Amino acid sequence: MEPTGTTPTTAPSTPGTSPFPPSTPTNLTASEVKTGSVTLTWTAATPGCCAVTGYDITYYQVFDDVVYSASVGAVTTTTITGSLRPGQQYSFQVAARDSLGHRSRSMAPLIVVTPVTDTGPDTTPPSAPQALTVGAVTTSTGTLSWSPSSDNVGVFGYNVYRFDGWFTSALIATVPGTTYTTALPASTPLRNLYYVRARDAVGNVSIASNTVELPTTSTPPTPPPSTCRVSYRNQSEWQGGFVATVAVQNTGTAPIDGWIVTFGFPGDQQVTSAWNATVGQTGTTVTARNVDWNRVLAPSGSATFGVQGRWGASGAAPTSFSVNGAPRTVG
């Protein structure tokens, strides 16, 4: 990774006139945010005893333990490349250094989320969910709730993550609404933190919400009974293409208000169009969210949506599904 700087700083002070390091740089902003690069710009630091000769940048992927660093000369803009990944959240800080090696304090972190594509029709992430809180907690489950996000096209749903407080962050559910009930985690030496990101149909994710912590249970909880059945059928298939339908049936006794079906293609299929649901795909993972008219599934009721796509090496059908974050019976 070799950042490039373009705008030189000016007006260094006379060496030896002050024992103080440079002031902290200010006004850190990000522009040209892409899947693998971010351009940072800041206001130059004021010299202390000596001329400002450069800036040190530290950054890391939020909810990860790997920290990166870069050093540039006496500039006020640079582009970070080579270590950023699509659809991830990063924290950036900048500090000034002078000719004698004095270093300023780092400025407050700037949080940036990279898009999942640079060329698609939608590269703007949703706003961050706000006010994540823990609601009802039973002996085996805890309920999370948060305020809704907004998006320039539309919020598709919300990704719920569990973070161990150190280096492992796992996506545990994608849900259509602003609440999620999860099984309490087993006891562990590490923490059990949770956070939420909004996502749109193409897979752009927002900056994360605040984190909350749930209590643990000493024994693994019994999973709740499945109240949905999902069936997947290839209606037609030809060399390089396919049309499939997916049916979601409520097998429980209470209505389901809002549903998101998630499944993974075992082959290299790519969805090109869909109907009766809003469908997005990231890698091999497909998520399909209800539209307004089929949002509610009454007891014994069902909704069917279709997808058309292409494949190269394999068109094998998926074999496992989840609805609103929970594994479901395959019909």
Image (cartoon, rainbow, N blue to C red):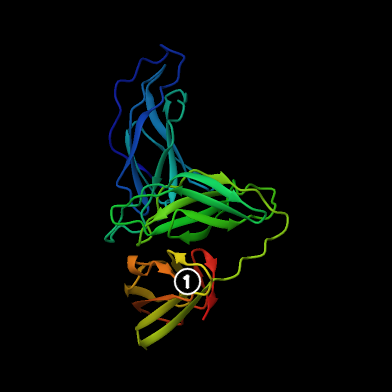
Residue 101, given in percent of the width and then of the height, sits at 47, 25
Q: Kindly identify the residue that appears in the image at 63 percent across and 65 percent down.
A: 223
Residue 45, given in percent of the width and then of the height, sits at 36, 25
Q: Is residue 265 left or right of residue 275?
A: right
Mark 1 element type:
strand
Find disc 1 in the rendering and name its residue: 263
Foreground: 23 or 170? 170
Q: How many marks?
A: 1
Residue 98, given in percent of the width and then of the height, sits at 42, 24
Name the residue at the top extreme: 17
Q: Kindly identify the residue that appears in the image at 51 percent across and 56 percent down.
A: 180
> Badge 1: how crowded within 10 Å, few (<14), some, or many (20+)?
some
Foreground: 170 or 177? 177
Q: Kindly identify the residue that appears in the image at 41 percent across and 51 percent down.
A: 82
Query: Three-letter amino acid code at disc 1?
Result: Phe
Residue 65 visible from this viewpoint: no
Residue 159 visible from this viewpoint: yes
Q: Is residue 184 left or right of residue 19?
A: right
Foreground: 145 or 254? 254
Name the residue at the right extreme: 218
Residue 298, given in percent of the width and then of the height, sits at 45, 71
Q: Kindly identify the residue that appears in the image at 34 percent across and 50 percent down.
A: 150
> With respect to residue 257, does 209 lie above or below?
above
> With respect to residue 290, does 132 lie above or below?
above
